[in-house]
Image: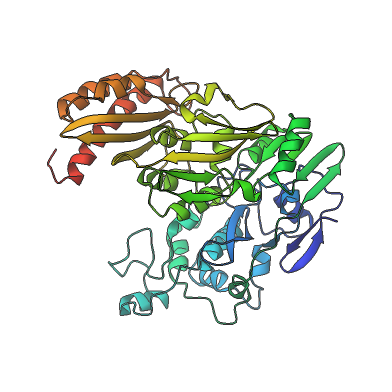
Amino acid sequence: MTTIKVNGQDASLDGVPVHTTLLDWLRDRGLTGAKEGCAEGECGACSVLVARPGIDSPTEWTALNACLMPAASLDGQEIVTAEGLGRSTELHPVQQEMAVRGGSQCGYCTPGFVCSMAAEYYRPTRTTPATAPRAQKQELNGGSASADASCDHEHGPNGFDLHALSGNLCRCTGYRPIRDAAYALGDPAPDDVLAARRSSPPPPPAATKVAVDGAEFLRPASLEEALAVLAERPDARLVAGSTDAGVEVNLRGVRAPLVVAVDRLSALREFSFGPDEVRIGAALTLSEIERLLAGRVPLLAQMFPQFASRLIRNGATIGGNLGTGSPIGDTPPALLALDASLVLASARGERTVPLADYFTGYRETVKADDELIRTIVVPLPLAPLTAFHKIAKRRFDDISSVAVGFALELADGAVSQARIGLGGVAATPIRARATEQALTGRPWTEHTVREAAAVLAAEGTPLDDHRASASYRSAMLGQSLLRLYAQHLAAEGVNA
């Protein structure tokens, strides 16, 4: 029997078609607070809370897009919807603040905002400072949310990180009242059931096998079982966060005959740092990796906030981003600059492939049908001068027109080594080899940089499409190197 615990009650998944999303399953059960606004993880109207293994506590309430996940992937798991947070006669603190501060007009997006806000409310490391200045305390009790100058425009005096709402879109209320509600939240009460739930571990992933109407869903119990399935069924569709596969199901009608979930396999969730390399399990989510690295890989620390939204990063994995072979993924340019390698596993054994040799054509890679990405390996030490530049139409929650990862080593005023990864300017992510050669061995001066920038502008084979023209992409490549140079001078305290 397959079940999900929803708002404290077990609900059966028996007979539910394999490709049914969690959102559709919830709404069919009458839990209609979560909405479908975009069906591709961009609006957050479908946000729900899922009990996931935590880094700072045994369980963390994680906000995820219900429109992307197959309901079957939550077998044995525990979720909370907006309906489970509070009742009309006893509102949850998040719901209360949204109501009294005018954070909802039409209400379509509100349940999703509430769930994403609740995930941040319950973040173990988010606490209201006991020594907050009086202006902050007044703000928490109903004053202006912009009163205290010690808080930047993306973090509240109560520790609330506004990026927690980066994947939620509102079309009518306006964001100021929603921000006010977020910044007015205190700490959970001592008798808060969901807060107390964090102290015990989440349900372990259930080994799942479902077959309905000719389609199958499988959650293998081990990596060995998963590899055996791939060896027998190379047509299987691997899913982790389903942030790409879910879009194909919703918008393109793709219905794979066999879906294999690998997101909770412990062998794909390993992490280690140093002394010679960083090893990142392919099924760790981007949010988990960001917190585990804690800024120790500055290039990735710059990339993470620009990768889609917090809602997406809570589910998406680097393994999935690389597995799609997309030329516009955000992780490949950064990882190419870091000289990363991939460990590919199959029932035949494992092999390590440099990421620079991994992509072979548009959405094509050297990974065989019976292989999966097990580990991403980043060698140490890291280059001291790094940067990640993303050019897109929106600051957050958007797809790159151009993405550039830089990793340079300087010695005695000259460039001793350069690695530059590019995305969005060719059929695959690529290394800017000609530009690397134009920089290596030359003095790190404006003259050198301008000459190399002209070379960088000619790298790749950019195309005209709805995101940008080829000429714009080329111009942004050249400007990116000039920007890196200006940023480095500023960091060194030198006037450009």
Is residue 136 left or right of 100 when viewed as pictured? left
Residue farthest to the bottom? 190
Picture residue at 31% right of the left edge, 80% below the top: 134
Indicate whether 324 appears above or below 46. above
Task: Decide which of 133, 37 is in the foreground and name it.
Answer: 133
Q: Give the image's coloring scheme.
A: rainbow
Q: Where is residue 95 drawn, in percent x and y? A: 57, 69
In the visual, does 191 lie left or right of 493? right
Q: Is residue 174 visible?
A: no
- Of the 4 image quadrants, the one containing the C terminus is top left
Q: Quadrant of the N terminus?
A: bottom right
Q: Is residue 208 visible?
A: yes
Residue lying at 76% horizontally and 42% vertically, measured from the top left: 19
Please give left or right for residue 289 compared with residue 204 in the image: left
Query: With respect to residue 12, does 135 lie above or below?
Result: below
Q: Horizontal and vertical percent for residue 260? A: 73, 41
The quadrant holding residue 106 is: bottom right
Residue in the image at 48% along x and 34% along y: 341
* Residue sitting farthest toward the left: 495
Q: Indicate the position of residue 309 as horizontal and vertical percent values.
A: 50, 48
Residue found at x 34% / y 74%: 136
Callout count: 0
